[in-house]
Image (cartoon, rainbow, N blue to C red):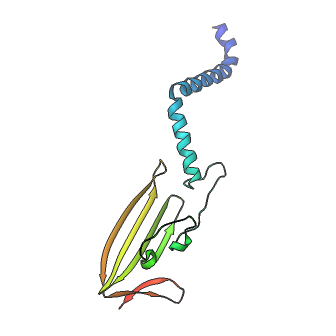
Amino acid sequence: MELLKQMIEYVPLFQTITWALLVLIAIFLYGRQIRSLLDSLTDRIHKGGISFAGIEIKEKMITKTSDIKEEIETFGQPDKLKLLFKVQGKTWQKSTKALEVPGGCVVQVTTERMSIDGSWINAEALTFVPNVIVLTDKDGANILSKG
């Protein structure tokens, strides 16, 4: 019993050594998985998916083809779809576009979000709205109006 009372002062030291050993064993056993997780986090940081250690990447919102700075190839008129609205965060974006056709407009709604591995997941909906046209309001925004 006397020995236990003398050893009580060394409990924090034993705890520190035990935790250090457990961390080393975990790194040894799960090193590949830890490296994969760190690579995934690093990739998301570079894509602007998360803010970590003060690193935050903000990109310009693209509203028309001319906003794209890299070299692209197009066929037809990609901006014929008129952007009604777009909103985006670091890991998601939503947009609604309209294309005038005889008798109304085809409206496309797009939702995109970044998954945990850094890839993008898309959902799209398309519908026909009869008897409307795309107009530009006084603020320069495209809106649907009865035609």
Q: Foreground residue, 97 or 65? A: 65
Q: Foreground residue, 15 or 129? A: 129
Give left or right: position of 47 versus 117: right
Residue 32: give x, y in percent of width and height. Answer: 51, 32
Residue 89: give x, y in percent of width and height. Answer: 53, 63
Give left or right: position of 66 versus 75: right
Give the answer, above or below, for where 2 lies relative to 24.
above
Residue 129: quarter of image: bottom left
Q: Give the residue at the far top of this rendering.
A: 2
Answer yes or no: is residue 82 visible. Answer: no
Residue 134: quarter of image: bottom left
Q: Residue at x 53, y 85 (%)?
A: 140
Q: Foreground residue, 146 or 60? A: 60
- Where does the C terminus fall, quadrant-wise? bottom left
Residue 14: give x, y in percent of width and height. Answer: 64, 19
Residue 95: quarter of image: bottom left
Q: Residue at x 45, y 67 (%)?
A: 94
How many numbered markers are drawn? 0
Q: Give the residue at the far bottom of this rendering.
A: 147
- Where does the N terminus fall, quadrant-wise? top right
Residue 122: give x, y in percent of width and height. Answer: 40, 60
Give the answer, above or below, for where 114 lies relative to 126.
above
Q: Residue at x 53, y 90 (%)?
A: 138
Q: Residue at x 48, y 67 (%)?
A: 73
Answer yes or no: is residue 75 visible. Answer: yes
Give the answer, above or below, for where 38 lies relative to 28.
below
